[in-house]
Image (spheres, coloured by chain):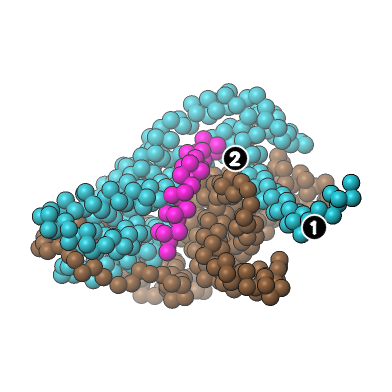
Chain colours: A brown, B cyan
Amino acid sequence: MKKSIFKNRFLPYLLIAPQLMIVVVFFFWPSFESLRLSVFKVSPFGDRQIFVGLENFHRLVTSPEYHRSVLHSFIFSGGVTFLGLAVSLFIAALANQKIRGLRFYRTGLLWTYGIAPPVSGIIWLFIFHPSYGLLPYLLSMVTPYEFNWLLKGWVALLLVIFAATWAHLGYNVAFFLAGLQTIPKSVIDAAKVDGASGFRLFRWITFPLLSPVTFFLFIMNMVFSFFETFGIIHAVTQGGPGDATTIMVYKTYLDGFVHMRMGLSAAQSVILMALVIFLTVLQFRYTERRVFY
Amino acid sequence: MGKTVFHSPPRSKKDWKKLIIHLLLILSICLIGFPLYYGFVVSTQSMEESIQKPQKLMPSNHLIENYTKVWKRIQMGQLLLNSLIVALGVSLGKIAISILSAFAIVYFNFRGKQLAFWAIFITLMLPVPVRIISTYQVVSYLGWINTYAGLTIPLIASATATFLFRQFYLTIPDELVDAAKIDGSGPLRFLWSILLPNSGANMAALFVVMFIYGWNQYLWPLMITSSDKMKVVVVGIASTVPTGTQLPEWNLVMAAAMMALLPPVLVVVLMQRWFVHGLIESEK
């Protein structure tokens, strides 16, 4: 806490006003509006609103369609998170050695952070293309199985998982690298003196010491794959085939903007809000986030 | 000859280990880079080459032809300009309002400070997609559909940058404030000539992270723009993907994708030092 402060009656309000205004208009207002709409039934043109209590939530809880979107979300997010963390931890551990050309290597590993998820999706869409794609072609040489994402839901899920993981790899590697660098060299040296090396050193020393970073990245990857991957779904699979890749955010969009079921969509937003608040609280609770007074 | 064989065995074992690490790193980089390389290769081929089997993994000579063709077809110039405006608007706007609000929170005591702090803090919790439909209604109520204001300002409503600057201000020694007071300079003078000149690294770091955040937006621009003139590039290129009966011009799709991803990837590569710092600091 600062001890030396300026005294002024109006200036602080003036300074904080722009941010507060934006936060109130574009954060609090819409958030409360979502909460309010979630207990209303709205006519398709939005001109009539009827209070229906928890009916929207009831419809969601009893809808097999919604259950499937929840399931697909968790498969998708679990896949992106697990694959992303495993690959990036392996790579970061490699790049944390004292070797020549490290700057070059790190650039080669971090640049994917710049790729927009939908752009990544389009590139992977071509790699997975049933008629022209490289991957189905290579697989067709070893197996007669039809590796066609337009027909097989799991292939479509794999496609969007790959696209999302690829676009997010640079982010994960950056945090793992930063985490690895905070591990004191003395601890590693001490373990080496005791005879630990290679995999054992990693398994029993490095990995446990890295667990705060891993946990943080676990949460951030869940948040990313739940909320920031809409573009991949929309640009690549449009939720299909069937509803195999319809994740919760995409379904919220479909119901609100395509099917014009505003109340139902708002109820889904509220469930997503609860989920993201839960994840964030988990993160604040278990990682040292120094944002408190 | 025998002498070289026995030459310091522990060292050569270490060298082997290093060689393996180098090889594994190069392999990882190749694997990570492959989709980009492949996309680029396809963007230099004719349509027939891009859909032939077995696939050609070497560049061809249609690069300029493809890029100019798709540039004209989807009005790439306008798309890139719009993306640039959004990315700059989001990054610079966020930095500007955050510097001011963090300054107010750290250097002043005022009524409602705690409340203001928490109001800003809580925005960390809800990403835009979660409240997308209501935000759309608010923006359309304001008449901001198909405007740059509608595209950028709602994306500025989050607290990450404010906390970064707050963290940084707290590390500035109090003596500097005292000295400024003795010199008779007011708070704005202090902000302008002491704090800002020292915030360069933080501003650069935030700029990179926010520029990419702004450039790579998809859902929000998709909803808020209906006219082609206001579209951003990430949304615009999605429309080049051939469907059903259209010609499979994947070479053009890839050319468009390359142009859309080059600017943000260049920003990451060229500003890598600040990017890593910004990423870690703004998420902490």
Coordinates of residue B46 in the picture (x, y in percent)? 66, 27
* Quadrant in which residue B119 is drawn: bottom left
Q: Residue at x 57, y 33 (%)?
A: B255
Please name the residue that numbered disc 1 is placed on. B9
Figure quadrant of residue A50: bottom left
Q: How many C-alpha atoms fall within 10 Å of the one at disc 1: few (<14), some, or many (≥20)?
A: few
> Residue extending furthest front?
B3
Q: Which residue was labeled with disc 2? A: B243
In front of the other: B238 or A115: A115
Horizontally, residue B53 falls left or right of residue B128, namely right
Residue at figure coordinates x 77%, y 36% from the top left: B54
Q: Amino acid at mark 2?
A: Thr
Alpha carbon separation for disc pair 1 and 2: 62 Å
Q: Which residues are magenta?
A: B257-284
- What's under tag 1, amino acid-wise? Pro
- Report the front residue among A190 and B30: A190
Residue A286: give x, y in percent of width and height.
Answer: 47, 75
Looking at the rendered image, the quarter that the C terminus of chain B falls into is: bottom left
What is the count of numbered marks?
Answer: 2
Q: Residues within 10 Å of mark 2 (few under 14, many from 20)?
A: few
Q: Quick one: A207 or B248, which is closer to the camera?
A: A207
| Quarter where residue A183 is shown | bottom right
Question: Is residue B269 covered in magenta?
Answer: yes
Residue B129 in the magenta stretch? The answer is: no
Chain label for disc 2: B
Instruction: Name which of mark 1 and mark 2 comes first in the sequence.
Output: 1
Q: Is residue B247 left or right of residue B170?
A: right
The residue at the point 63 percent across, 57 percent down is A97
Determine whether A121 is above or below B45 in the image. Answer: below
Please state the horizontal and vertical placement of residue A196, each as a whole percent of the image: 70, 72
